[in-house]
Image (cartoon, rainbow, N blue to C red):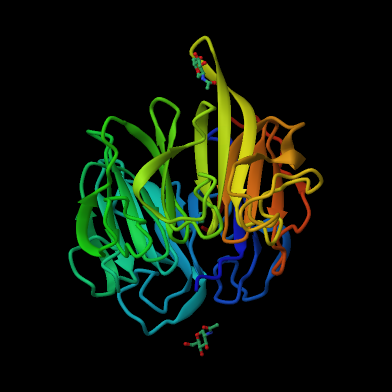
Amino acid sequence: MRRVLFVLLGLLGDAASSERDFRVTGYNYKGQLGDGSYENKYLPELAWNESDVILASAGGYHTLFLTAGFGLYATGGNSFGQLGIGSLNTLNTSSPQLISNHLFVGALAAGAYNSFIITTGGKAYAWGRNDFGQLGDGTTIDRLSMVLVAENVAEVAPGDYFTLFRMSGNLEVYGVGRNYYGQLGDGSKSDHTSLTRVLTEGHSIVQVVAGSAHALLLTSAHRVLAFGRNDYGQLGDGTNDDVATPKQVMVEHNVTEVCAGAKHSLFRTGVLEGDLWLPQATYAVGADNFGQLGLDRTGQVEGPRGNMYPSHTVPVASMTDQVVVGLRAGQFHSAFLTEGNKVFMSGANTEGLHSVTTTTTAKTTTTTSTSISTTT
Ligand SMILES: *[C@@H]1O[C@H](CO)[C@@H](O)[C@H](O)[C@H]1NC(C)=O
Ligand SMILES: *[C@@H]1O[C@H](CO)[C@@H](O)[C@H](O)[C@H]1NC(C)=O
Ligand SMILES: *[C@@H]1O[C@H](CO)[C@@H](O)[C@H](O)[C@H]1NC(C)=O
């Protein structure tokens, strides 16, 4: 079972300025924070070469970093080759290792025990754990170095043992790997070692996210399709039944962002003003055993399995007085990015994450974009 308990906070200033500031907090057992130590961090601290990191993605026990000069680095655990350094001789490292400096990398996605990148030209490369074929290379062989797995890819979302790829041309989604709960969304529950099309007929998909074994798709019409494992009500359809054919949820709102934790889901809604979708509200559903939904428990709607696991989306009560502009989720925690570059967190705090909703005020700069990456 995946144990992901760390957070990377990135604040990107004007790309040319030196105002960028990259921070990490949480579990560091395998060196996944990349700060040269194996000590857990209880407050966000400056990460490795922080002034140079422009993208980062947190996996199960490892982290991918991209530097401004397209240096692709990995740090942390390497038990399945997820560092992409070509061997298993180094089982862990707290000093980021260079994987590549010749690819124009546009996106990073660290999975539980594997890693994906997408180049600016839409090529997806993968490495690491592949026991269910989740890398999408047509085999079930773990890869110690990157292999090209798909082209024309806009977005990749690794779940625990499955992966979803959103294609840039037709805005369709393909899945590969384990399908026991219907997490590939192809209407079956058979595993696939080559890409299978997710049943999204009639929809153009603009965002894909994966939890441990469930997935959410955002459509261009601001609707949400959900499928996969639903034991904690994480699909938000009001039941605990797994879904193999994507099902519309959150139909009463215009959704502008979806986010998946291990067994919980977050949604952000918006109101159209002119050409712009302005932030409206934040909703959550699924496992709340660590407070990861950020709810105010009084007066909460009961789900089929009681208060801990609402299966109908409920407003994130602790964020109703904030303008939330971004969502991230880890295994047992959630992060809410607000206007003014504040980050609020809720959920498990065992290794330095915030247990009650508290604020981390990120450094104030002339910032135009801010990113948080937490493990999923
Ligand atoms: C760290 O950042 C400095 C300054 O930007 C740069 O010269 C150096 O090459 C970077 N090191 C790595 C390992 O990326
Ligand atoms: C890290 O790697 C070292 C050397 O391979 C190994 O002895 C140690 O058990 C590893 N630690 C963890 C937490 O995996
Ligand atoms: C979604 O947004 C459209 C465009 O502003 C609006 O007409 C519609 O009523 C909204 N639907 C919901 C459910 O809020």
**Residue at left offset 68%, top offset 61%:** 289
**Residue at left offset 24%, top offset 48%:** 123
Residue 214: percent from left, percent from top: 44, 55
Residue 265: percent from left, percent from top: 55, 48
Query: As drawn, is 25 to the left or to the right of 243?
Result: right
Query: As drawn, is 69 to the left or to the right of 356?
Result: left
Would you identify the image quadrant in which residue 88 lies? Answer: bottom left
**Residue at left offset 53%, top offset 59%:** 262
- Give the camera-side residue of 345 and 87: 345
Query: As drawn, is 345 to the left or to the right of 138?
Result: right
Residue 19 visible in the snapshot = no
Query: As drawn, is 331 to the left or to the right of 206?
Result: right
Residue 235: percent from left, percent from top: 49, 48
Residue 231: percent from left, percent from top: 52, 60
Total tally of numbered discs in the picture = 0
Q: Residue furthest top?
A: 274
- Give the camera-side residue of 367 and 261: 261
- Give the camera-side residue of 157 and 50: 157
**Residue at left offset 42%, top offset 56%:** 242
